[in-house]
Amino acid sequence: MAEEEDTKIRILQSLRGKICEGKNLGPCSGPNRQRDLCTFCTISLDQEEVFRTKVFDKSLSPFYGEDFYFEIPRPFQCLSFYVFAKGVFQRDLPVGKVSIRKEELCKFSGKEHWFGLQPVDPNSEVQGKVHLEMRLNELIIENGSMCQQLLVRIIECQGLPLISGQNCDPYATVSLVGPARSDQKKTKVKKKTSDPQFEETFNFEVTRPNSYTKKSNFQVEEEDIEKLEIKVDLWNNGNLAQDVFLGETRVSVKILRNDHIHRAWYLLQPKGNGKSKTDDLGSLRLNVTYTEDNVLPSACYTPLRTLLLKSPDIKPISASAAHILGDICRERYEAVLPVVRLLLHHSRLVPFVSAITVLELENTQEANTIFRGNSLATRCIDDMMKIVGRSYLTVTLKPVLDEICDSNKTCEIDPIKLKEGDNVEVNKENLQGYVQKVFSSITQSSSSCPPLMCDVFRSLRHMASKRFPDDPHVQYSAVSSFVFLRFFAVAVLSPHTFQLRPHHPDLEVSRTLTLISKTIQTLGSWGSLSKNKLSSFKESYMYDFFKSFQEDKCIEKVKKVSFCCDVKLTVPISSHYLFCYREIQKRAQGRKRIGKRNFKKRWLRVTNRELSYHKHRGETCPVRYFMFQVLHSEKPLYVQAGNCVEASEWVEVLSQVSRCNPDRLGTFHPSAYVAGAWLCCRSLSDNQPGCKPCTPTLLANLQLDIDCDRETERIFSLLTSSYSKLQKMEDACASIAVYQGPPREQDDYSLFTIQDPKETFHTVQQITHILEELQREHDTRSGTAQYGSQENPIVGKTS
């Protein structure tokens, strides 16, 4: 078992992107055309919905603006975006969909594209795969002549879709189809399963010419084989309702020309390949980035990980592996994050940030432009704040943002954008009240600032004062430029991106948040406050509005928060952080019958101090498919999440909040205790210790639960994709070292920071050697699964 783990490759998938907007949604003409369409979008992995936007009112060209990110916990074939028209007295009606097969996602990665909507046809909504075996047997019939018999064995299916949120009741039809024949047979119905085991065999006679007499070396004759095929259809048994099509596959009998037995997995396909002609249904603008990490065993990454973790100690810092990565991938926004996460996990981020900050300050000529660019230092600090400051944002901003979004007061102060009947003075008063609440929440939040952020801010203050000793204000602006401009103001502008709100706000609230964010940025900008640079406002109405904040107490509050954020204060033990709060299905343990009465809707709530579930949202009380298990002192709690992504997120959150629990169990039962026995190990005692080991974890800060192997694999991928630039940097180092001056090809090398060419050259050579070794490991271990295997099923023909 240990040897298997040492060679096993983990395939980790994630999806990130944005549902931007729709255009001309719905049929372009005819009786189905609606002018006041209220729409929303959903995201589905195959047929499983995993994300939903809010409803956008009465627009054929709505702006959704919904960001999404989630880990994908299972294999899938197709990613689909559906547009629905919200029904008032009836069910929601599908307008159209965009479907992208998994293998085509890379074509659209990282860029916005317009996709035309396709019709939602029940015969095209398929997922799953089927395992088939086909065999040709030679038989002698009563008159002594030879005939051929085709045996088709349908073994099993996997990953069939849910029907109305429940496991389906599948059955299969198996047909031998030819120009003049269509023989069909049917399996038994399997109850309540998405992975049915059929194990049924069907016989079909293959008509042979009268002239055929050979008994040995049997070869199927070409005229028969070219025209026959086996067609397998999967259906959900509807009982009293109509049966639902689940997918099909077609296999030509000619596949048995060379082999008498054929056994393989096939992906289920839609009828007619899921395409049909229709009116223009509109289009959807999407940004989709699919990432698949093939993570090797941990030992494979030791050399690269060690080299990266040495980065803070390398002199000069520009010769370190982490800095070189930032240099050659500076135009790729995602390049810094895996380095930050890796250094963060190993407590090496603060010294690295300090070193690269010193390098940036050396190139900063004026104190009032400090940390204003998009440098490696500012990007590292930005990513660090997003990782460790999530709870800080929740405690500080969520209550006031909820109030702003729910109360929906008009705050427009631009005379050009005022609506008829608006009172600009009332709007200004509303806006001023909101700004005061947000500003006060920020300036009073120092005690909630995470210790790691405090460490970084303390370092920034010290280095800024050292670089500009004659400027007494720079120690404050160095911190406030991050706290206000790059952290809180960004979260106010896009609260849904930081999980402070469930959806993108509507246009009016979004405008209010934009005005608040602009004001907060200016209030937090020490240069604007101390040097009275109100002329920096391009809009005169913002200039007039901001004058009411030009008071000494505002300046003192900015100074106070900039100073206090570098003092290590811990959050009072009485503080509660809400990590997850969603609707789930609760089932009582021990009941024999499984019915609607045994599954009850509850709201499950996880904070840093407790796990509780409630009958109704907002209440406080003690604490089938996509099920997970929570073990606590009294008994196991079985919870049914809404989909695979939601179940995965619940397990991750619960694992994180319990990882520092000193009484955490070492083993668990993966199945339920039913009818006096555990289904997994058949033990009769309900107090029997678990039969499976729990996932081992290290005691660490909740927010630093980082998969270092995955981050190192991402760094390997980034370095590999930028290999040509790495070679250019190596050439630049060699040229500078030989000629003792700038190289002739200055344009090629000017983007690189090379302070010490010999040290940088040495690090680049180390990186190159490690990349070659890691690539060999990938090539050795990442053999493609055989076509037709369970891991690599065949894409069958469609009707």
Image (tube, rainbow, N blue to C red):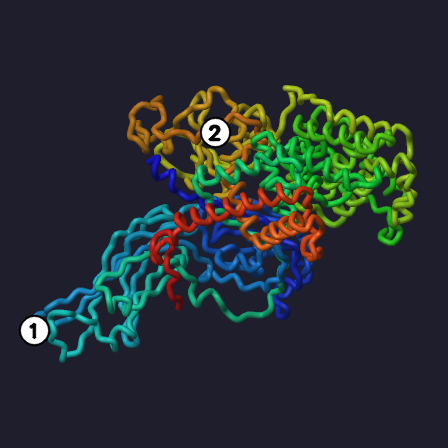
Classify mark 2: helix, strand or loop: loop
User: What amino acid does circle 1 point to?
Assistant: Asn
Q: CA distance from mark 2 to mark 1?
A: 72 Å
Q: Nearer the viewer, residue 258 or 458?
A: 458
Quick one: 455 or 547, which is closer to the camera? 455
The spot of residue 22 in percent (x, y) is 65, 59
* Residue 162 visible to the viewer: no
Q: Residue most toward the front?
A: 739
Residue 248 found in image quarter: bottom left
Give the residue drawn at x 68%, y 60%: 61
Q: Residue at x 90, y 47 (%)?
A: 541
- Could you say which disc has been placed on residue 143 in the image? 1
Q: How many marks?
A: 2
Counting from the top left corner in percent of width and height, residue 8 is at 39, 42
Residue 697: which numbered mark, if any?
A: 2
Quadrant holding the C terminus: bottom left
Asked whether the residues under the numbered discs 2 and 1 touch, taking CB atoms below 8 Å apart as contact, a structural biologist would say no
Of residue 100 and residue 792, the one placed in the foreground of this image is: 792
Judged left or right of residue 86, residue 776 is: left
Which of the 4 quarters of the picture holds residue 516?
Answer: top right
Q: Secondary structure at mark 1?
A: loop
N-terminal of the two: label 2 or label 1? 1
Q: Which mark is residue 297?
A: none
